[in-house]
Amino acid sequence: MEFQGKVVVITGGSSGIGKAVAIELVKRGANVIINGRREQMLVEAASEIDPTGTHVAYVAGDISDTQIADRLIGEGLSRFGRIDTLVNNAGIFIAKPFTDYTIEDFTSMLSINLAGFFHVTQRAVTEMIKVGSGHIVNITGSGVVVHPHKSLPSVLAALTKGGLNSATKSLAIEYADKGIRVNAVAPGVTNTPMHAVETHGFLSKLHPVGRMGEVQDIVDAIVYLESAHFVTGEILYVDGGQNAGNW
């Protein structure tokens, strides 16, 4: 009953973690609105999430565009009447030596990882304040964010995803007395289409437990946080032990 009738907005919902979260929450009785940049992928994902179309809607476009953020929250309101939860899952990862990053890399990562988070979260919080309740879950990052690894230089991930970790705590404190909780899930390297199969052996070795994370590991963490009403400002590491120390 925890999810029955809830309205959940999920960015980056056309594949990987976002789609898996949507599938799980719809199974538990929620309504979801997913976002992604490729409309055909969203159409296919929506059909998989709920073949009846009753409990799923989608908005295609770049979440760093303020008009897309407006449409995404607006779709939740017009279709389902409110916004209960926002899962900020959209993000990209580019690993390069610092001096090899291009201005395009910098712009892309800040646009998607930070600007997208800012625009949609600001609009979601505005609606949550009106009803005095809500929950935001940010998908941030462990591993190279918390413990940089020489074999995987990725300062832009540290800059953007590390920033989201700090923003999670700041928002949790700012809105705790408004009935809005803000938490984060910090995954290790997760087995999604983002990572080519030939890299899995190397990526598995970055985790003390000796394997990559699975999408269901992250889904389970989000489900827990959604149900944990006394938890806010938490960075929940689901990373096979990466954040515990250097490996």
Image (cartoon, grey):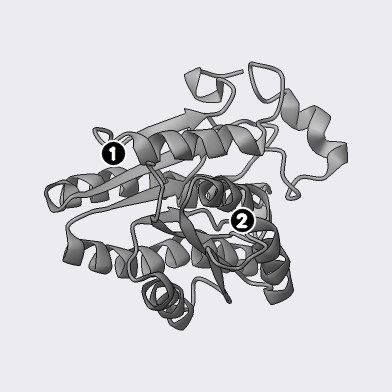
The residue located at (53%, 52%) in the rendering is: 26
Q: Residue 13: percent from the left, percent from the top?
A: 59, 59
Q: Does any portion of residue 96 appear in the rendered image?
A: yes
Q: Amino acid at mark 2?
A: Ile
Label 2 residue SS: loop
Q: Which mark is residue 92?
A: 2
Q: Is 97 or 1 nearer to us in this picture?
A: 1
Q: Residue 91: percent from the left, percent from the top?
A: 56, 56
Comes first in the chain, label 2 or label 1 = 2
Q: Residues within 10 Å of mark 2 (few under 14, many from 20)?
A: some
Residue 15 location, quadrant: bottom right
Q: Residue 1: percent from the left, percent from the top?
A: 39, 41
Give yes or no for contact between labels 2 and 1 (Cβ–Cβ under 8 Å). Answer: no
Which image quadrant: the C terminus? top right
Q: Seen from this angle, which residue lies furthest right?
A: 198
Q: Which mark is residue 208?
A: none
Q: Is residue 117 above or below residue 17?
A: below
Q: Residue 236: percent from the left, percent from the top?
A: 42, 32
Q: Does any portion of residue 144 appear in the rendered image?
A: no
Left or right, 245 with reference to 171:
right
Q: What separation in Å lies between label 2 and label 1 (alpha carbons)?
A: 23 Å
Query: Exactly how many numbered labels are in the figure?
Result: 2
* Residue tagged 1: 233
Q: Nearer the viewer, mark 2 or mark 1?
A: 1
